[in-house]
Image: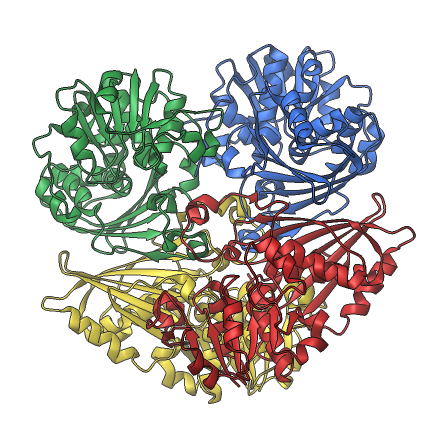
Chain colours: A yellow, B green, C red, D blue
Amino acid sequence: MKVSVIGATGYAGVELLRLLKNHPKVEVVHITSESQTGTGIENIYTHLNNVYTKKLISMKDIDLIAKDSEVVFIALPHGHAMAVGKAFEGKNVKLIDLGADYRFKDTSIYEKWYKVDHTHKDAKRVYGLAELYRSQIKNATIVGNAGCYTTASILALAPLAKEGLVDLHTVVIDAKSGVSGAGRSAKVENLFTELYDNLKAYNVGGHRHTPEIEQALSEFSGEEVVLSFTPHLIPMSRGILSTCYANLKPGVTTQMVNEAFEKLYKDEYFIRLLGQGGYPATKNVRGSNFCDIGWHVDERVGRVIVLSVIDNLVKGAAGQAVQNFNIMCGFEEKMGLEGVPLYP
Amino acid sequence: MKVSVIGATGYAGVELLRLLKNHPKVEVVHITSESQTGTGIENIYTHLNNVYTKKLISMKDIDLIAKDSEVVFIALPHGHAMAVGKAFEGKNVKLIDLGADYRFKDTSIYEKWYKVDHTHKDAKRVYGLAELYRSQIKNATIVGNAGCYTTASILALAPLAKEGLVDLHTVVIDAKSGVSGAGRSAKVENLFTELYDNLKAYNVGGHRHTPEIEQALSEFSGEEVVLSFTPHLIPMSRGILSTCYANLKPGVTTQMVNEAFEKLYKDEYFIRLLGQGGYPATKNVRGSNFCDIGWHVDERVGRVIVLSVIDNLVKGAAGQAVQNFNIMCGFEEKMGLEGVPLYP
Amino acid sequence: MKVSVIGATGYAGVELLRLLKNHPKVEVVHITSESQTGTGIENIYTHLNNVYTKKLISMKDIDLIAKDSEVVFIALPHGHAMAVGKAFEGKNVKLIDLGADYRFKDTSIYEKWYKVDHTHKDAKRVYGLAELYRSQIKNATIVGNAGCYTTASILALAPLAKEGLVDLHTVVIDAKSGVSGAGRSAKVENLFTELYDNLKAYNVGGHRHTPEIEQALSEFSGEEVVLSFTPHLIPMSRGILSTCYANLKPGVTTQMVNEAFEKLYKDEYFIRLLGQGGYPATKNVRGSNFCDIGWHVDERVGRVIVLSVIDNLVKGAAGQAVQNFNIMCGFEEKMGLEGVPLYP
Amino acid sequence: MKVSVIGATGYAGVELLRLLKNHPKVEVVHITSESQTGTGIENIYTHLNNVYTKKLISMKDIDLIAKDSEVVFIALPHGHAMAVGKAFEGKNVKLIDLGADYRFKDTSIYEKWYKVDHTHKDAKRVYGLAELYRSQIKNATIVGNAGCYTTASILALAPLAKEGLVDLHTVVIDAKSGVSGAGRSAKVENLFTELYDNLKAYNVGGHRHTPEIEQALSEFSGEEVVLSFTPHLIPMSRGILSTCYANLKPGVTTQMVNEAFEKLYKDEYFIRLLGQGGYPATKNVRGSNFCDIGWHVDERVGRVIVLSVIDNLVKGAAGQAVQNFNIMCGFEEKMGLEGVPLYP
């Protein structure tokens, strides 16, 4: 299967190259960068020396890319994939966008939170959270790969929303991410010295992953969900932990919660259920496509607290993209994604 | 003022020595350790070489300690201070316990959460959170210094509880701490390799600081508060961030929230209000006794999110103990606590 | 190929399991631990959940292990592999020992530095540094896998020693390692709090990898090499950087140095030469079996400084063991070792 | 004593403010920044809120600064202090430059290594390494504060150079620094993600602190010293460790080495000798002006290895500047510098 990566020089793009390198069915034909066209990717990321060496071209060579590729991954900042999507119309290429442009059913929500006009509203698109939208992904042409915080959070709460076990008006998601989620642009605030031995929240009440989580939970529950989402920056490279709180509906027991998780995820390879009392840790999934989930039904306070962890660059970005790719192409879903987490 | 430190070899004890060293009114006369009696503290903590050199004695020399000291700091694991407190009865020495033994009005709560019998129930004791219990601390003989998570959390929520601005049944506290809070005992789970580039929650629904926060908020509000408290271990040395969520009561505005914080804290040196939209960061208080607080009234969801940070070993332990000491002794409250945060 | 791992619960052992998991020709039949016999490895290392689940047996079941295995990896502390080696004599099993017991030609050197009697002196053994001892490894029954610091250091200096370009009496090796090299035992000195934001040297002049490096360089040069080796502990998980200094012999040019490296390593997949002026970084090899080498001929001072990096758990332990295994079994040398470094 | 700080917004400048804040004899009257003139320093470094609040002015207001200040600290990048120094001529203000412009006796060496013309060659200047140049600093008008790597390295080697115990042609200095030494400018290479869990050398053979160390050792020994100096970037905030190697002259014993250190430093408050076999650790000096030194006479190889640690921002920059200031002003040398190291 011939694939290309548009926007290969960000952390998500280069993680995609890591995963695609060992995918038995993939050949990467083109990779692009606008600011470093003509440079070898291995000169920008020297860990790729002798492993992955290829010249970056411009994404303006759209015809070349379309001609040579069966699937194209887009790893651009939000707002830039729509134009690419339009340009590929009618070219018989499947698109997997790692950004936000194709994640929303209602583009007015996208426009409100991202403050960008949506220029490809009529695109037939599918939300790319594999475990929960698999059947639609299978036949999709454009997949809007789920976001990092959203993947961890939706996977944590979907069983409870689907089974109606919690009061969705009480949902609070307190999420924590390693710094690779902030990207590779040179900003004082992302310097080692500023973040090491430091901890803070950001974008309280305004993070753009909020409506994405609300969209999914509303779908699963049939009611309009409005929730609190607070992201935090943790002094580590990779990993997201979502700590999700919700009031239990009257009469809901631990067993009912356990069963909801089992029911939805018992056959999922990438979801590892740690059960009531389980404590997922980000290091346990580092470098892998796993999502580990534990929960705590706390009768004293009448709440359930769900903890879920992913590697933000794998299950939260590139790994999920490959998983979606496998689904779209009819490959085994874990193909190329069987690496053991890197521990310690 | 002659003081002694019982249990000087834990991280809180040695931080106390750091602060007391430059306190203009203090002379430290005795320091104790049961496992390393006879050793110089500078041999255990070599950063104290030439700075602070003193032989550790046993706390069994209670008469000697009592004779030589006007104030005694106790930095022992919970359950061990009660016996010390009893032994000092009638000896005209003031006690500041950094552990949990003297923090609870209702010792049955202590016994339930700590699973230890309380053997000094009739002790006249005061809860040692300086900004909120100052007048009682002034005349106290035994102060139960507030815990680390509790200090950050109570200071964040006290203005809202006192002014009745939030529904206290909806309080969720998601707290994060650096590893020094876990102490210095040799455990696999606290090894560098296990915690570096890693993140996890622990003791969900069962952490012992929960009832301490509930006790204070119940007092301030006049209603019985039951809340969710979730601690997390962050791969950094020092610092706590408490992210506190509560539903706003109908009609409560941002201005009312702002005023509640201003009213309670406007004259407090150690509390720095960052206001609506402010983002405290643990590195901004590292090594200092400050507590930085910001808040976000989120009208979309009808909640307020309060963020507060402290250095767990200073305002969360040794610094607060010195602040209480200053109050008890009639010294200026910030004496010995004016060091600028260490940044970066 | 059926293999077993004796001593599977240390960091090197578990890293071996990670690599063997995806090796296309390997089936792991037994794994052992004396302190946790009967436990599933996935209960000790929970990142292995659903990925690698197997009960630990005792290495006392030597007959069972011998019967079921064609190759056995030993990942025990030094001093313990010799007995295993003796017990396997005549059992038609190949052994790869990740420890030091089979690394020395002259066992008296082992006995002097390790302060242990050698009890298997007549073992036919081969030193397991693949790039430099490949032809011997091919036919070996017992391989003493090279140490971590030694691999980085010998690979850095071998070309210069072989070509006689430097004065070997002037060799100084200043090496730095991440903390995983210190193992997983519970010691105060290895706690997160003690090592984070900290840096120190240890075992100056006495580290046991010194004679191993001296043995190899003496062999390559034909003269007896005595050198300075200083290890340092770096606050990171994985990675070794060896900074090697040596005086250039009169008349030696940069080109001659360049050619020495090219000559020895130009066909080596796992050695990536960054050339004169190149700066290897540990993160560039993290999780992989690569060794990146750069050098600086400094004419002003008449020295060459060689910099080499490896992942101490991969090329410095488990990866090299798999590489040796491939050589011994006639597989392609990079089989199972083609994972791309995990960056960032 | 009224002082000003020119260039207050770098890490060294802001560390100077931290130390000056609690100096009992100092009032800071002006602080400058060219890029952020008019802004309060507490808006750039929010840890200074309520602690240190002052508007930044431009250093072009040279007359104002000169009129109001008795001593001026300059914390500008190299090449910029010379113009300031010239502008202050005849203004009866003492200058302490934390950069390199006034460190060299022979300005041609400066010009060669820094590739900048020296425009103030006739300045009467003194090298500001307090322990070794105290008597000259006492009467100086312009002090060129010693560099960070150089302070650690010169203090380590001075006793051996002065007593003629080592062959100075064999000196190799392998130095390691925390990231704060790289400053606060926004560069991809200094991002958290790039440096965390990573390690590398830089500027091998070409670092500008090399000639500064050579200048001092040449002076102390009376012979021209040419040495190898290799800096490394360590994933931590603060701290430098210099590992220094030199061949012992024939007949030199451990005792002679011990005595050389004792002789030179026995009365120095800021130098803590750990002796033969001692291991300094950067965390032991964090936030303090101490320099801890241990050494290892290694008879097997005929070398001595000296290890020295400092906090690069304190003894390596701002603390040393304050120490020099105290000497120049006749204050007790440790005034304002008695803070205990921040541990853990």
Q: Considering only vertical position in the picture, is A208 above or below A143?
A: above
Is A304 left, or right, of D262 in this rendering? left
Q: Considering only vertical position in the picture, is C217 above or below D326?
A: below
Q: Position of residue C185 (x, y in %)?
A: 42, 55
Residue displayed at 53% across by 68% down: C82
| Residue A59 showing in the rendered view | no
Q: Position of residue A75 (x, y in %)?
A: 54, 69
Residue placed most toward the observer, D62 or A167: A167
On-image quarter of the N terminus of chain D? top right
Is C309 left, or right, of A284 in this rendering? right
Q: Position of residue C163 (x, y in %)?
A: 84, 62
Q: Residue furthest bottom?
A: A330
Image quadrant of residue B11?
Answer: top left
Residue placed most toward the observer, D70 or A333: A333
Image quadrant of residue D210?
Answer: top right
Residue placed most toward the observer, C138 or C224: C224
| Residue D35 showing in the rendered view | yes
Is C39 left, or right, of C309 in this rendering? left
Tally of marks: 0
On-image quarter of the C terminus of chain D? top left
Q: Residue furthest right?
A: C251
Is A233 left, or right, of B147 in this rendering? right
Q: Considering only vertical position in the picture, is D260 above or below C147?
A: above
Q: Position of residue B285 (x, y in %)?
A: 40, 36
Residue placed most toward the observer, B264 or B232: B232
